[in-house]
Amino acid sequence: MRYNKNTLIQEFKVKAKPFQFAAIDEAIRTAQFVQNKALRYWMDNALVNKFDLNKLCAVLAKEFSFAGELNSMARQASAERAWSAISRFYDNCKKRIKPVGYPKFKKFARSVEYKTSGWKLTGTKRIVFTDKKGIGQLKLVGTHDLGYYPVELIKRVRLIRRADGYYCQFCIQVNRREPLEATGRTVGLDVGLESFYTDSNGRKENNPRFYRKSQAKRRTLQRRLARTKKGSNNRKKAINTLARLDLKTSRQRKDHVVKLARCVVQSNDLVAYEDLRIKNMVRNHNLAKSITDAGWYQFRQWLERYGQVFGRVTVAVNPAYTSQECFSCGQIVKKSLSTRTHACACGTQLDRDENAALNILRAGLVAVGHTGTSLHDRGNASGEMTATYLGFSSGGQVTSQKEESPLP
Ligand SMILES: [Zn+2]
C-alpha cells in the first residue's frame, strides 16, 4: 500500500523463541511465493488485472497447503505487491520513463504483510498471529505505545527480517496534518556531491561524515569477506557483519535526511528541487548507485511527505540548464564540473551551486504559478504530480531501503 499524509508507522523489535522466528521465515517465504506466482500469472495470461490476481490467491491456497496456511488477507497483500510492480511498469511505459522497470521475480523477500486480520493485540506490547503459520505470540520491544490508537486504525502489520533481527511494523491511519503558519520564505535546493545541497541563499549543507566513514569500513569488511571460504561459518559471519554495517549506515542516513527535510520544510513555504531521476540520467550515470545518491532520493521523498503534513508546497523541476543558465540574465554559461564559480558577461558572479539553486527556485515558482496547465509537456513536474511512491509495496530504483519505513 502507499503511504499518504495520514499514515503513521510504528516499529518494534520482536522478541521470540527460535521456532517462532522459523515460523516468521516460513510466512515470508510463502508471501514471496504468492507474489511470484501472481507475477507469473500476469506474464502468462493476457489482460490480467488486480482482481484476477486476488482470485488467484484463493486458487493457490487450495492448491498448496503452505499457501493456505497464510492468512487470506496476507496472501492478497502479497499479490498486491506484484500488482504494484506491474502497474508501476505500465505507468513508466506510459510516461516514457526509463528504465521502465519490467517486474522481476522476488528472490530474497524480507517481509510479510498482514492487513486487518490474522493477528490480534494482546496487550500494548504483545501481538499474536492467528493464522496457521504457527508464529504465535510475539513480544514487542520499543518506545511506542500501541494502546494509544484505536485498533481499527491499524491497517497493516508487517514482519520484517533484518541483519540484526526481526521487526514488527504497524501502519496506522491517523490524520497527520499539522499546517504551519506561513513563513514568507521560499527556497531552491541544488543537491550535489561536495555539499549535500546548496540553497538559493548560498548556504551549504555539508555531507555527513558517516557516508565516507562507513564506506572505508565497508571496503575493509569486503576484503575480509573475500578471504573466507565459500559455505564456511566465517563467511556467514562476515556476510552478517557487512549487512549490519549497511543497516547501521542506512539508519544513520535516514535519520539525517528526515531531520534535514523536516527542517527545510518547516522553515519555508515553498521548496523547489530538481527532479533527480532526470538529473541522474543527464549528469552522472556512474554515480547512480552511490550512497549519497540514495540519500538524495530519500531526502526528496521526505521533503514531499513533510510538505503534505505541514501544508507546504514542494516542487520538482526539470534539471536541464539549471547550472549553466545565468540567474540574472538567462545567458547560458558553459562550465565543466570542476568550475566552481558562475561568472557571466553580465557581471554576475556567484557560487556555481548557488546560481543553480536560484534557477531551481525560480523554475519552482513558475511551475506553481502555472498549476493546472500541462506542466509535464513543458518538461516540468510539480511535486504533487510526481508524488512519491513511498510505499509498503513500492521501491525506488536508487534507494536501497525499500523495506525501511519512511516515518520516524
Ligand atoms: Zn548573466
Image: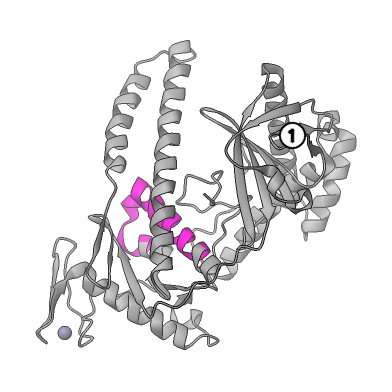
Q: Is residue 246 left or right of residue 396?
A: left
Magenta residues span: 280-305
Q: In the displayed orientation, state which residue is furthest to the right.
A: 62
Q: In the displayed structure, would residue 77 be above or below residue 163?
A: below
Magenta segment, prevailing SS (helix, strand or loop): helix
Identify the residue under disc 1.
127
Q: Nearer the viewer, residue 82 or 124?
A: 124
Q: Nearer the viewer, residue 213 or 274?
A: 213
Secondary structure at numbered mark 1: strand
Magenta span contains residue 367: no
Q: Given the image, on which type of amino acid does mark 1 rest?
A: Ile
Q: Give neighbour class at mark 1: few <14, some 14-19, many 20+ (Cα, 10 Å).
A: some
Q: Is residue 135 left or right of residue 402?
A: right
Q: Nearer the viewer, residue 260 or 30?
A: 260
**The N terminus, quarter of image:** bottom right
Q: Residue at x 34, y 77 (%)?
A: 361
Where on the picture, by quarter, is residue 137? Answer: top right
Q: Is residue 297 left or right of residue 10?
A: left
Q: Residue at x 42, y 20 (%)?
A: 238
Residue 346 screen position, x and y as percent: 11, 87
Q: Residue at x 36, y 46 (%)?
A: 291
Q: In the displayed structure, would residue 89 be above or below residue 157?
A: below
Residue 294 screen position, x and y as percent: 41, 50
Q: Residue at x 54, y 68 (%)?
A: 308
The total of numbered circles placed on residues is 1
Q: Is residue 382 visible?
A: yes
Q: In the displayed structure, would residue 34 be above or below residue 199?
A: above
Q: Is residue 322 visible?
A: no
Ligand 1, what quadrant?
bottom left
Residue 149 screen position, x and y as percent: 71, 51
Residue 92 screen position, x and y as percent: 56, 64
Magenta span contains residue 290: yes
